[in-house]
Image: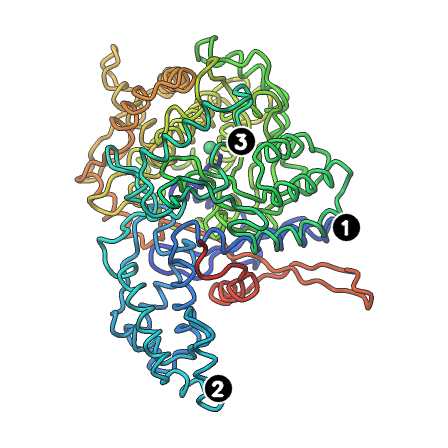
Amino acid sequence: MFVLTAATIATSCGTQKEETEFQYNDERFADLQMLRYQVEGFDELSLRQKTLIYYLSEAALSGRDILWDQNGRYNLRIRQMLETVYTDYAGDRESDDFKALTVYLKRCWFSNGIHHHYGSDKFQPGFSEDFFRKALHSVDPSKLPIDSALVATAAANAGQADSKATAADPAVVAAVDALCDEIFPVMFDPALYPKRTNQADGQDLIQTSAANYYGPGVTQAEAEDFYLRMKEADTDPAHPIMFGMNSRLVKENGQLCEKVWRSGGLYGPAIDRIIFWLEKAKTVAENDKQAAVIDRLIEYYRTGDLRTFDTYTIQWVEETEGDVDFTNGFTESYGDPLGMKASWEGIANFKDKGATERTKKLSANAQWFEDHSPVDPRFKKEKCKGISAKVIVAAMLGGDLYPSTAIGINLPNSNWVRAEHGSKSVTIGNLTDAYNKAARGNGFQEEFVIDEQTRELISKYGDVCDDLHTDLHECLGHGSGKLLPGVDADSLKAYGSAIEEARADLFGLYYIADPKLVELGLTPNADAYKSQYYTYLMNGLMTQLVRIEPGNEIEEAHMRNRALVAHWVLEHAATQASGHPAVELIQRDGKTYVKINDYPALRDLFGKLLAAIQRVKSEGDFEGARQLIETYGVKVDAKLHQEVLARYRALDLAPYKGFINPEYIVTEDKNGNITDVQVRYGEAYDHQMLRYSRDYRTLPYINE
Ligand code: ZN
């Protein structure tokens, strides 16, 4: 599970000294801002550790095509068509059409497909079908996703290698036209596949989602029934595997069956490449346990067996000695409308030892936090097990963590593994840091925060409390509580992700105000938490709306969670007996602001909602989850939305941010042994994307 960055609440801190020449901000286009992150501490690692990170980085990049195909069955072909025109088009590259194609391609790169990475709406191309068709006819057809034999014959007829003549070959012309006829509606028709992941209550979520997790013709009812039967047939229901997590569910001859993502199966060529790098990584592991973890992952990739996957995650959780670590595999299920099938992601990282002291204090006191939480004792863990928490430095981001990324990760996702073996929780320090530094002085706080006093509070404590809230969310929040015996972990269905995120956020909000944190030296004083309360509510009630198009509702799980928490608290604060609401929305000079009147009373409300949400989760109360989310987490006040968008637009900021990766430059001796690994920054966004498409192309255009 991960917390997406709340980029819109990134604090701007004018008080700290200017940074060195490292450029955190890079290219900007559409609603996106590209950033760079620094791999601080890489130079201090041993050669063996650097080499391990290099191999794990290659493994993290090798699954890129999998995600593109998971996000939509036409994505790999569309990417190739766009990239070919982008690099080879000999027409007017200053024309509006070409410029619009450039922006569209950059957005697709960012989203790993043709739908928005966050809102999941399909991009509407700003160039014409006619332009794109002509452009495709003008480029070297051997680079297009059409039958290569046909192109080869045409080339032979034309006297080899003359791509102009080949492009004019009637058979090639017909093939390119057929390609356009098939693909263009997918790109240009707004009614076709409008959503990657549809979460609208009451619709068939599979049939109305473009995501490629279910084959053509599979309905939501059929899929739910298929997996229900599978669960009922489970021989070890106390230790359920993550049913359906690593496969596409398809219909063949009228029968439902799973196509498993594994070596020799669906996505096999990409998985084999990942295995190739993991095999190398194994040889330079920091210890035997770590080598065994990598080995088990390889076994899982070879077999696709989900029991092996559970064993792998247990070994991974229990390996805490090494400095270097990774996530590599089918991990998060936010992209599946049913929340079962996991998108592929990869990250290579190492421990930030200084900052990890912070999270160690939290995990060392995990039982204290569990015992003192405001939830019903029946839903508490009697014994908190193996919660390990650390702050890490990201060294490479891949798959669903690139370019848009999480700032904290807590894995594994299996409930029984978490209960019996614990979980690993990380805060990605160098990414948070990059967000904060890139946001300094951008005017956001001045526009939306109510007064100078509150801005000062945020300026002083915003960064430290944001980090701490992430730590609490990841290393304690997700790990806290338990399901009642017999409750199915999937019983909240499409509402499960948002409820789980709300639970973790509320755990963090409740405890960030606890005197215990001052006692542990984690917050500097008893007032610091107020900065987090203010920014959280401002985000949930107002500023996160900058990520929503006018007229749309809130769909993404983390955003629904924040809206739910903020609106529930706002409503319940208004009906408090004192008649003096703890928090309210006020108007001043035609602008809306969040006004907090009573911080301690807010803490009580967060505690009450945490108890309510924990009950819903522990009892698997689907109707309770639906009520909470649909009442507080989905709807948007159109008037306030318009106002927030206008104020935000005036600041000229990008609502979404993502990262360009560094490169690792390897030096080898004449025997092929690595003698040095250096990190390099500065690669341009388009260069990196084109390089990845060339060097990490692992899959055919069509994966059936
Ligand atoms: Zn989370």
Q: Earlier in the sequence, mark 2 or mark 1?
A: 1
Q: Earlier in the sequence, mark 1 or mark 3?
A: 1
Q: In the image, is 119 to the left or to the right of 380?
A: left
**Foreground label between 2 and 3:** 2
Where is mark 1, residue-wise? 48
**Foreground label between 1 and 3:** 1
Callouts 2 and 3 close, C-beta under 8 Å: no
Spot occupied by residue 341 in the image (x, y as percentages of width and height): 45, 39
Q: Secondary structure at mark 3?
A: helix
Give the Cα distance between marks 2 and 3: 62 Å
Give the Cα distance between marks 2 and 1: 50 Å
Q: Mark 3 Cα within 10 Å, few/some/many (few <14, many 20+)?
A: many
Q: How many marks?
A: 3
Spot occupied by residue 549 in the image (x, y as percentages of width and height): 25, 47
Camera sees residue 543? no
Q: Secondary structure at mark 2?
A: helix
Q: Residue at x 40, y 60 (%)?
A: 28
Q: Residue at x 48, y 55 (%)?
A: 35
Mark 2 Cβ inside 8 Å of ligand 1: no
Q: Nearer the viewer, residue 25 or 315?
A: 315
Query: Image quadrant of residue 582?
Result: top left
Camera sees residue 616? yes
Q: Residue furthest top?
A: 377
Give the Cα distance between marks 1 and 3: 29 Å
Query: Image quadrant of residue 311?
Result: top right
Q: Secondary structure at mark 1?
A: helix
Where is mark 3, residue-wise? 471
Where is mark 2, residue-wise? 156
Query: What's the residue type where badge 2 is placed?
Result: Ala
